[in-house]
Image (cartoon, coloured by chain):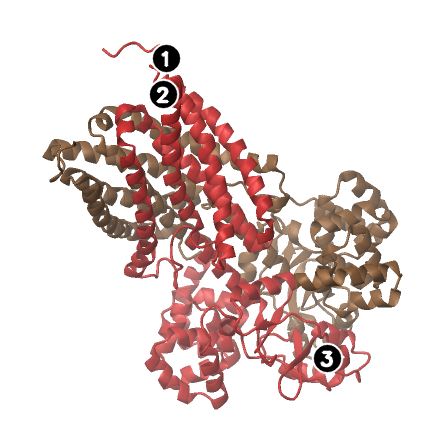
Chain colours: A brown, B red
Amino acid sequence: MTIFSMLYLPELREMLAESDSEGLREFCTALHPARTAEFMEGLTAAEAWQVLQHADPETREEIFSYFDPDKQLEILETQDRTQMAELVAELASDDRVDLLHEADDGLVAELLPLLPAEDRRDILRLKSYPEGVAGAVMTSDIAKLDENLPVREALNELTRQAEELETIYYLYVVDETDHLRGVVSTRQLLSAISKPETRLRDLMETDMAVVNVMDDQEEVARKVAKFDLLAIPVVDDEFRLLGIITHDDVIDVMREEATEDAHLSAGVQPLDESYLKTPLITLSRKRGMWLTILFVTALFTAFALQHYEQDTKKYAWLVMFIPLVISAGGNSGTQSATLVITALARGDVKLTDWVRVIRREWVMGLLLGGFLALIGFTAAMVLNRNWLSATVVATTLVLVVLAGTLVGSILPLIFRRLGWDPALMSNPFVTGIIDIMGIVIYMNVAIALILLIGDTPPVDVPPAP
Amino acid sequence: MTIFSMLYLPELREMLAESDSEGLREFCTALHPARTAEFMEGLTAAEAWQVLQHADPETREEIFSYFDPDKQLEILETQDRTQMAELVAELASDDRVDLLHEADDGLVAELLPLLPAEDRRDILRLKSYPEGVAGAVMTSDIAKLDENLPVREALNELTRQAEELETIYYLYVVDETDHLRGVVSTRQLLSAISKPETRLRDLMETDMAVVNVMDDQEEVARKVAKFDLLAIPVVDDEFRLLGIITHDDVIDVMREEATEDAHLSAGVQPLDESYLKTPLITLSRKRGMWLTILFVTALFTAFALQHYEQDTKKYAWLVMFIPLVISAGGNSGTQSATLVITALARGDVKLTDWVRVIRREWVMGLLLGGFLALIGFTAAMVLNRNWLSATVVATTLVLVVLAGTLVGSILPLIFRRLGWDPALMSNPFVTGIIDIMGIVIYMNVAIALILLIGDTPPVDVPPAP
């Protein structure tokens, strides 16, 4: 695809140079708008806008909406204001709000007065919702119909609106003051075509999924997924219909949330732009903040080791296994935390399941810890040829892995109980806590076993030369 | 919602005991099937099936399809075979294949002969696709229409099929041997209602997104998201139309993939069932495998430290900061790896961007490492009151954090270049590699600086008593 688009670029530029209207018009309409936009990737903003001049307004708006946000913004900033106002008026109501959010306030102030009053009001209203709530994702282009309309007229109305609306697959039925009363799918309407006098009131579903305009976008995605919807209506506190959120926006929300969760779990404050476009100074702030918190937590490992300095001096072999035991604990803790976090997010585990979760992780910790202890015991015998160190390492591994699975599973449950997002930093936090616990457990096991069985010399090792 | 469903349960049981047909029929149809299914959560499989007897076959199938997979399977296994065959025949073609995948082979062998020949063939064909490819997710219930059909007849056909098909929002246009020729949306059909003699051939889009039946389900999700589709057609190598994948299945695929990626990045082999339902023995295998690999990698830290045993014996303060410096490297490495992995998955970063990525991470490493070095220097002065140790810790932190950002960003790029999934284990691997590099860097910096400036005594510390 990329190669094709590069080959096509010179031809496109030639058509532009020759002002080949017919060729350019055909180019704009021959392909799916998403693909046309892809072919135009290599053009400058000015060239791209020049090409779009040859498309009808509707196609122009469609292709434009598939450009990447940076090119959209550049066109908006550099091209003729009046034309831009016309374009903005054509764009889907949610897309244009996203675009104007990116533009600087001066430009927005210049464009708004050029728009029809209705569009202007719509933009100002949608812009007022905070990011991440239903209101900021919804579109206000909806088919609202009166509950007393008969099927025949509803079909006519649908046909009339088919070209303008973002989705025509649900018709929302409202009373005279815009309160949502029910929903009729195009499918139901088509099935009722033989009874054209039926009123929407008698056809509509009244038990429908809705979201409040201030609901979190994650909640929106969860409901749409649960009820297999194409679109979900957005209402205010009085159940007045304000807009809808369509399946494609839900998919975008899900992609965004998945990325955010991944970043948070690695200790990166979610980025507003893509990785390559985020300025280095922003990136260093978003990473540095958590890195510092984690570093300060990790400082306690140094305090802990200082506390045991006499022991590590006396038994030098103790040092060798410090990173090994704490990494084993950290890894098992991360596993447990991730399993519990994803299960909570999917609704597979509820807070009331906490006893079951802890019981499972208890068994898991003993099993996994026991297995690693076997390997650790063997490794310590090979490295150190010393029963004492091998016993210390093996015992510590069981306890540290167990601590990992328990802390890793309990921490997200506590976070959720406190109303925090369990994804928030659980993984690095778990590792930080386990690092410190690992050192304390290791040292205490060592001291206890040395007291119990005494410091034994290495097994059949020849004296140093 | 949960409280409501518990309150409702006794009433439902009472209606069952009294065989209150009318009440039960109303219960089945009053709500959205997803919600009805939710109300029935507390019922046993036998009770649930008894309730569904009072719904018409279509509603019965719809409510059943919203039960959780375990209850579906239990009903299938325990209830009357003939009734189960009827139910299976009614289910959407992709849902029933999922269900039969879970059932044991004996039961499937009993049910298949009771099904109409066409359904049987369809099930056997869909069951043959490996998990995770388009063929395994698609449904074969599609509206296929002839390219010569006029709009009027297409609308009649659509109305006729509206009740049976999973989605009626796209009509697929095929030739006489089922090769996909184009697609017409219901919206286009409705817009053309004024010209009822137009043939589909002249209305259809021929440039459309399709997927091959063996394409990975992640590719399917990417295409549907990119082109904002409600459904995507699935074709074989000869472009014959085999089925479609609808938006709700794409949302399910995305949820599944997000969970899988999260698990992989924490070193857990993805689970086939939910966390609480996975047997402990399976869970310990899926976790133990990676935990062992990581443990064996971590063993090298013990080898490395053994190598430096004389140094840690001589300069005991070195031990104190070992976990601190390796955790700083691990955390910065995990940040970089996660940023690059998510950017690769979203298409924000391509392999050809590797120079830019490394340049950014190079600057990032110096900035973040420098900042942590400042804190580390102060902490070492407080803890150890020794210029040498503070200088060693600070220098090491810069280098280790830099190593973290570089390894963390390069490893996923290499994985992608080799055709592996970058999510696969990058995070724990990065931490493992950085643990070892961290120790080697720390020890060498210490040795070099001790040689250079000599082992200095603690700053103004009274002699030990």
Q: Are marks 1 and 3 on the same chain?
A: no
Q: Secondary structure at mark 3?
A: loop
Q: Which residue is mark 1?
A: B459
Could you tell me which secondary element the residue under label 1 belongs to? loop
Marks 2 and 1: CB-CB under 8 Å?
no
Foreground of the two, A397 or A151:
A397
Q: Quadrant of the N terminus of chain A?
A: bottom right
Q: State the residue in front, A418 or A368.
A: A368
In the figure, is residue A396 to the left or right of B356? left
Question: What residue do we see at 49% from left, 52% from top?
Answer: B414
Q: Residue at x 61, y 71 (%)?
A: B232
Closer to the chain start, of discs 2 and 1, is 2
Give the residue at mark 3. A196
Residue receiving disc 2: B383
Q: Is residue A336 visible?
A: yes
Return the x and y of residue B441 as percentages of the image width and height: 40, 33
Which amino acid type is marked by label 3? Answer: Pro
Report the Cα–Cα distance between label 2 and label 1: 11 Å
Return the x and y of residue B287 as percentages of the image width and height.
33, 54
